[in-house]
Image (cartoon, helix red, strand yellow):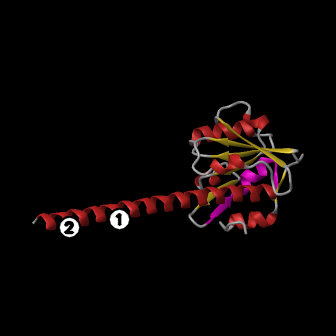
Amino acid sequence: MHLSYLLHLFAGLCLLASSLALADIQTHSRGTQAEVRVEHVRQTVLDILSYTRWPVEPPTMRLCVLGPTEYADNLFHISQQANGRRVTVSRYNVGDPLVPDHCDVLYLGDIGEAERLILFARLRGHALLSISEQAGPCSTSSVFCLQVNDDRVRFNVNLDALALSGVKVHPAVLKLGRAGEALP
């Protein structure tokens, strides 16, 4: 009876250990998928920037992150675009009065509709590109709205917001955005 109890206990411990190992693998896999999504967002933002032109091209692109974000972590590791232009990345509060004069690109996280409307009212007359992590705001204010999946990032484009933004985006990118595609 003692040997049978030990074998049963050993089998139970093996089952528990394998369950914990499986849970660890699944958690690591999710972490890896999250890291991939964050990297895909970084690359998509860089791609969008490379196809955007300002009335007066800034020597250093100032990318500002506003609101709580899920995918912005790797944006803070950007130091230059593929064309060599320097990029600075800063985080601001949505209501910060410095935003219109210290930003060329806004990367918007989870911002309430009322805050969003106030922000965009303050931005009128400034050449700013806006990119939102969420797909919904494209119907109201952001130029680009991301749709983040495990395997890639798609985006929508709001042509009305683009017309008000003061920046120009290559027509091929706009075509992709209207179709909800991803940049190649």
> Residue 8 placed where, x, y %?
19, 66
Residue 158 visible, this orientation: no
> What residue is at 79 percent from the left and 67 percent from the top?
172
Relative placement, left or right, of 14 versus 105 is left
Q: Which residue is mark 1?
A: 18
Q: Label 1 vs label 2: CA separation?
A: 16 Å
> Residue 60 placed where, x, y %?
84, 44
- In the image, what residue type sits under mark 2? Leu
Total number of numbered labels? 2
Residue 82 visible, this orientation: yes
Quarter of the view holding residue 121: top right
Of 146 and 158, nearer the camera is: 146
- In the image, what residue type sits under mark 1? Ser
Element type where label 2 sits in the image:
helix
Q: Which residue is mark 2?
A: 7
* Residue 17 among those drawn in magenta: no
Region rendered in magenta? 152-168
**Residue 63: assigned label:** none
> What residue is at 45 percent from the left and 62 percent from the top?
25
